[in-house]
Every structure is written in structure tokens, then in C-alpha cells.
């Protein structure tokens, strides 16, 4: 759980240190802006922007029932963020597994990627697809969902 928050926490702490230095030099307006930028980047890299994660086994079980894709991701991954943003509201209609929170999810990704934890890995109908085009992923979502 904590591993997913390391990058956002470091970004907020770094932003606080930079802002403090700017305030000490008399640039309080610029410090507030800089802190806001760091906070926004931290928020984007946090688990908060992604739909609620479930365990890999539960996601696979649900996918077998409803046919929705399973997306394996981790926080701090720019490719995962790109996929999430480009999917928009469609992202909520898929099953998301954070591999840093779920060891079974990390094992699924390693099995699909020759031992590497390459994300995003999207599993559609039991077949893994590494870093697929978001438009293609959107097409894989069943219309009845």
C-alpha cells in the first residue's frame, strides 16, 4: 500500500522544500504557484486518479463474467496515466489492478512480459496486450456494460 504513495509523497515534500526556499527569498507568490504545481503532479501520480483497484484474481473472475478488460497498472507510470486519461469515463467500465498493491497482479504481468513488470498490461479475453492504444482498449469494452 505504501509503495504506491512514495512518489506522490516525495513530490509534495520536494515542492514544500522548494516553496520554503522561495518564501525565504521573498517570493511568496511564486512559492505558492510552485507548491501547487508539485501538488498537481503528485495527485496525477497518486492512486487517486485511477479507478478503485481490485485484486487480480477478483478482476479475472469478474472479467470472465462480464467480458470487461482487466488493466494492470502501477502509480507513477506515465504510460498508465496516458491510458487512464485517454480512456476518460470509459476507464470506470474496466477492472483495474494495481500491481504494487497486489502480488498476484504483479505475477500475471511478469508471466505475460517475460518476467518484466511492464505496464499497462491489458488482458482482453484472456490475452495480454502490453501498452495498447487507448482507442483500441475502448473498443474492447462490451457495449452492454
Image (tube, grey):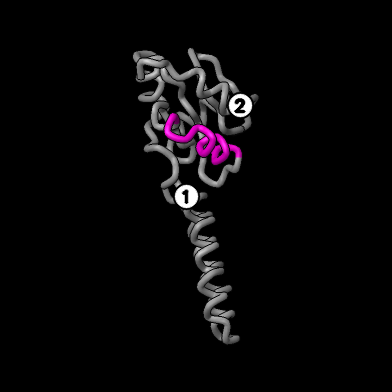
- In percent of the image, x 42 and y 26: which residue is there? 94
- In percent of the image, x 41 and y 27: which residue is there? 95
Q: Position of residue 142 (x, y in %)?
A: 42, 16
Residue 46, numbered label: 1
Q: Position of residue 15 (x, y in %)?
A: 54, 68
Between label 1 and label 2, give the one nearer the viewer: 2
The part of the chain drawn in magenta is 79-90
Q: CA distance from mark 1 to mark 2?
A: 22 Å
Q: Position of residue 81 (x, y in %)?
A: 54, 41
Residue 91, numbered label: none
Compared with 100, 137 (above or below) is: above
Compared with 83, 6 (above or below) is: below
- In percent of the image, x 56 and y 67: which residue is there? 14
- Image quadrant occupied by the C terminus: top left
Q: Is residue 87 magenta?
A: yes
111 left or right of 104?
A: right
* Element assignment for label 1: loop
123 left or right of 51?
A: right
Question: Hey, which quadrant is residue 131 in on the image?
Answer: top right
Q: Is residue 52 magenta?
A: no
Q: Which residue is mark 2?
A: 133
Is most of the magenta stretch helix, strand or loop?
helix
* Element assignment for label 2: loop
Q: Position of residue 112 (x, y in %)?
A: 59, 22
Camera-nearest residue between 54 and 48 = 48
- In percent of the image, x 54 and y 35: which residue is there? 86
Amino acid at each position: 500500500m505504501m509503495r504506491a504513495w512514495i512518489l506522490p509523497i516525495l513530490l509534495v515534500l520536494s515542492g514544500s522544500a522548494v516553496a520554503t526556499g522561495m518564501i525565504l527569498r521573498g517570493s511568496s507568490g511564486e512559492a505558492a504557484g510552485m507548491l501547487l504545481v508539485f501538488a498537481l503532479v503528485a495527485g496525477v501520480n497518486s492512486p487517486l486518479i485511477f479507478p478503485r483497484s481490485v485484486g487480480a484474481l477478483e478482476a479475472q473472475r469478474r472479467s470472465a463474467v462480464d467480458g470487461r478488460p482487466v488493466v494492470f497498472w502501477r502509480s507513477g507510470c506515465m504510460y498508465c496515466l496516458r491510458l487512464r486519461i485517454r480512456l476518460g469515463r470509459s476507464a470506470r467500465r474496466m477492472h483495474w489492478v494495481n500491481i504494487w498493491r497486489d502480488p498476484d497482479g504483479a505475477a500475471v504481468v511478469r508471466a505475460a512480459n517475460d518476467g518484466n513488470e511492464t505496464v499497462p498490461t491489458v488482458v482482453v479475453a484472456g490475452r495480454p496486450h502490453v501498452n495498447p492504444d487507448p482507442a483500441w482498449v475502448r473498443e474492447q469494452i462490451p457495449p452492454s456494460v
